[in-house]
Image: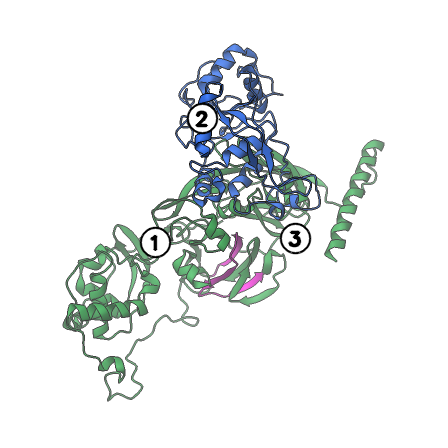
């Protein structure tokens, strides 16, 4: 079926070229049997780096659009202390966002920077023709290739390098998105963002410092060390978080460069009002929690923002989010709406057997209270693994810009009482740990005094830390003290709004 | 045994200065085709021990002024020809004397070799020598050797290239086959990569190509894929900042 349509289109095009030729030959303009939109004028496309999206197209006619895109091999940050040689379209991963309109005729100039080691080309899924343009764009270092194409199909399309070995070029970051806006445009929204996921394969394990070479073995096995949004761990957290306001409607142009993993794209705390699945132009699904985006695929999601929060963008294959870096943040400010969400209203002791019983009658509480350092450490390790490790990581290193480290943490070691308060009552707001600012929330941990004493003894004597023990008596005294855990620094005024 | 042969032949035979006698061997093309043998015999020949340096190429330019940067015809070298040199006959800081000359076209490399009474090596000759590691004739059977090559390919070209003899010396005594520059071969365009590297595995039997994994004889040799793709992106008048050459000569 689709083959028939494709064939017809090709035939029509050939016919139209034939007619145009006749037209020129006979030098008459009385009748123009042009099945494609007439091209009026010429413009150079505005290209943007993620998370920014070029402005919507307002013109009502097709035009000739000139796209100048440069391939460049650059050493950039993959994670704190970890660098990687990315192969890029435009100097960043993902590549520059290209925005054109259905019917436009694009003149594409692909330049390969003279310092490149590799030849590169481009396959745009928006192109109808040999290799999506790859057949016309293999470009050696220091050269420029030019080819042109008609934007036949509206939609959000992935583009990528298709030079041998293709998998490696893509694994090194050579992908981006091109949006072909439908003639009637897309519904108006307040903010648009560009987010693209990719998986990376390094010689060293996640977090191993230094310039990490590409690992072909891991790529073939599809065992990535990093799964990230917009080319690095922490690309959209902290000061780089996406920002919007309550009452606004946002659209995310989401792509998956792969090369291997399919994304289960989810925003924690929100529901997608509309999803244009697979990058098509129909908002064909509503009220979606998680949408599946394959490598070489895309989607557009739209949602309104009703209450202030820091919404977390994740691949809901959660080990990728919490252990391989696939986390982003959308910080939304504005007035609260308690009709929709109250926040925590109360936290009281839960006593299923009634008020008379003050301790949980289970095996754990029957165990002797830990007293010696060895006892505290052993129990603390178990408590840590069950309650803390998901965020602070098994190494105690945390996750850059998201979860602060416990390892060699000046903040942790400075104040025993404060730590007791934080574990038992939680902490929210900006703190400074080892010179870096973290601004997130740690919930209160439902742990008894023995567990708190144990886990604090454990973290204060692990991961390169060395301190005294925290006794159960310390915890009792600490919890009773009136001091509330407070952030070390005052909240900064919010940075200026990002986005379009 | 092999090493002994190499040493004996190079000492006893009349090997031109700066060249190494490469013993008879076999080249296994990356791309299999029914019409091609899976391995091609390579007759014994001489190969320069190192890539041609800026200093050596400068002597050529002085003796052959038609190959000066300012006088070369565009048909024979594009506008980036010798762009890393300070001027027509001055190397300057970006082109150390002992670094390999780059930004030279296939025509220029061919002319240099002819001036020296030599010729460019064929793809088969070059690939055969390149497959030999420091300690084994079948280097590609050594994952560490392949990995080291791949790591060089993944890095951008430095602004100023290192000098020759700083990367590796294979068991024939040839330096810098990997890790310094790409090198021209006489028949670089005989194995076509059409640019659409994935389509090349299809029905077009005349094109041996690209990531044509279906017919690749060695799925793991990604480094070889890259050399084929690189050659496929070139035209004979192209010059790039990482592409140089060395000469070969028939052996009696």
- A439 vs B33, nearest the viewer: B33
Q: CA distance from mark 2 to mark 1?
A: 60 Å
Marks 2 and 1 in Cβ contact (< 8 Å): no
Q: Seen in the image, is A321 located left or right of residue A103?
A: left
Q: CA distance from mark 3 to mark 2?
A: 78 Å
Write down which chain is painted blue. B
Quadrant of res A150: top right
Mark in front: 3 vs 2: 2
Q: Residue at x 57, y 42 (%)?
A: A163
Q: CA distance from mark 3 to mark 1?
A: 43 Å
Same chain for marks 3 and 1? yes
- A81 vs B36, nearest the viewer: B36
Mark in front: 3 vs 1: 1
The region drawn magenta spans: A247-276
Chain letter of disc 1 in the image: A
Chain letter of disc 2 in the image: B
> Which is more N-terminal, label 1 or label 3?
3
Q: Secondary structure at mark 3?
A: loop
> In the image, which disc is placed on residue B8?
2
- Chain A drawing hue: green
Quadrant of res A212: top left
Same chain for marks 3 and 2? no
Q: Position of residue B246 (x, y in %)?
A: 51, 24
Residue that label 1 marks: A400
Residue that label 3 marks: A184
Q: Residue at x 59, y 60 (%)?
A: A277
């Amino acid at each position: 079926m689709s083959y028939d349509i494709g064939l017809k289109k090709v035939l029509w095009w050939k016919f139209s070229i034939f007619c145009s030729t006749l037209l020129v030959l006979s030098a008459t303009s009385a009748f123009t049997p042009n099945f494609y939109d007439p091209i009026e004028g010429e413009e150079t496309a505005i290209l943007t780096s993620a998370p920014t999206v070029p402005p919507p197209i307002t013109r009502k006619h097709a035009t000739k659009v000139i796209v100048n895109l440069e391939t460049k091999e650059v050493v950039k940050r993959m994670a704190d202390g970890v660098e990687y040689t990315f192969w890029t379209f435009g100097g960043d991963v993902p590549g520059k966002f290209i925005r054109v309109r259905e019917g436009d005729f694009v003149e594409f100039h692909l330049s390969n920077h003279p310092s490149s080691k590799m030849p590169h080309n481009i396959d745009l899924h928006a192109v109808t023709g040999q290799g999506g343009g790859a057949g016309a764009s293999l470009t050696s270092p220091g050269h420029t290739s030019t080819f042109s194409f008609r934007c036949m199909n509206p939609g959000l399309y992935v583009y990528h390098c298709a030079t041998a070995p293709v998998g490696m070029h893509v694994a090194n970051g050579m992908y981006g998105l091109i949006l072909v806006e439908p003639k009637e445009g897309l519904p108006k929204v307040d903010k648009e963002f560009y987010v693209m996921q990719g998986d990376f394969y390094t010689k060293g394990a996640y977090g191993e410092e230094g310039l990490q070479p590409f690992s072909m073995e891991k790529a073939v096995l599809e065992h990535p060390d990093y799964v990230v949004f917009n080319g690095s761990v922490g690309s959209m957290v902290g000061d780089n978080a996406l920002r919007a306001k309550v009452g606004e409607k946002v659209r995310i142009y989401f792509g998956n460069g792969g090369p291997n993993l399919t994304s289960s794209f989810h925003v924690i705390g929100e529901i997608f009002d509309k999803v244009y699945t697979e990058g098509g132009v129909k908002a064909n699904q509503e009220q979606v929690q998680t949408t599946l985006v394959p490598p070489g695929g895309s989607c557009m999601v739209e949602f309104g923002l009703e209450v202030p929060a820091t919404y977390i963008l994740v691949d809901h294959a959660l080990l990728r989010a919490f252990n391989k870096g696939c986390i982003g943040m959308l910080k939304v400010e504005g007035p609260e709406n308690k009709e929709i969400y109250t926040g925590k209203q109360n936290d009281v002791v839960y006593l299923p057997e009634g008020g008379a019983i003050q301790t949980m009658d289970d095996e754990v509480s029957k165990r002797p209270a830990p007293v010696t350092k060895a006892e505290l450490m052993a129990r603390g390790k178990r408590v840590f693994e069950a309650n803390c490790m998901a965020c602070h990581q098994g190494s105690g290193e945390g996750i850059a810009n998201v979860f602060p480290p416990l390892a060699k943490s000046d903040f942790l070691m400075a104040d025993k009482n404060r730590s007791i308060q934080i574990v038992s009552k939680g902490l929210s707001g900006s703190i400074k740990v080892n010179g870096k600012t973290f601004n997130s929330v740690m919930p209160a941990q439902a742990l008894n005094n023995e567990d708190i004493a144990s886990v604090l003894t454990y973290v204060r004597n692990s991961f390169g830390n060395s301190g005294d023990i925290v006794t159960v008596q310390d915890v009792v005294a600490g919890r009773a003290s009136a001091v509330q855990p407070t952030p070390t620094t005052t909240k900064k005024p919010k940075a200026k709004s990002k986005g379009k | 045994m092999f090493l002994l042969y190499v040493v004996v032949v190079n000492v006893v035979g009349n090997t031109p200065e700066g060249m190494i006698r490469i013993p008879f061997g076999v080249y296994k093309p990356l791309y299999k085709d029914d019409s091609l043998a899976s391995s091609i015999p390579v007759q014994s020949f001489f190969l320069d021990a190192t890539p041609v340096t800026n200093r050596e190429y400068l002597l050529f330019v002085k003796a052959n002024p038609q190959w000066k940067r300012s006088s070369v015809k565009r048909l024979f070298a594009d506008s980036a020809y010798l762009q890393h040199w300070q001027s027509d006959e001055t190397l300057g800081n970006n082109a150390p004397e002992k670094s390999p000359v780059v930004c030279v076209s296939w025509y220029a490399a061919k002319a240099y070799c002819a001036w020296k009474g030599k010729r460019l090596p064929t793809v088969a000759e070059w690939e055969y020598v390149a497959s030999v590691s420091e300690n084994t004739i079948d280097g590609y059977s050594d994952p560490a050797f392949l990995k080291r090559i791949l790591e060089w390919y993944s890095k951008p070209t430095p602004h100023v290239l290192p000098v020759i003899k700083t990367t590796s010396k294979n068991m024939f005594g040839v330096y810098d086959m990997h890790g310094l520059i790409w090198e021209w071969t006489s028949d670089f365009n005989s194995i076509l990569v059409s640019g659409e590297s994935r389509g090349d595995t299809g029905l077009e039997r005349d094109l041996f190509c690209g990531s044509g994994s279906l017919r690749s004889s060695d799925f793991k040799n990604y480094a070889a894929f890259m050399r084929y793709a690189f050659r496929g992106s070139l035209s004979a008048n192209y010059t790039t900042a990482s592409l140089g050459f060395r000469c070969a000569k028939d052996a009696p």
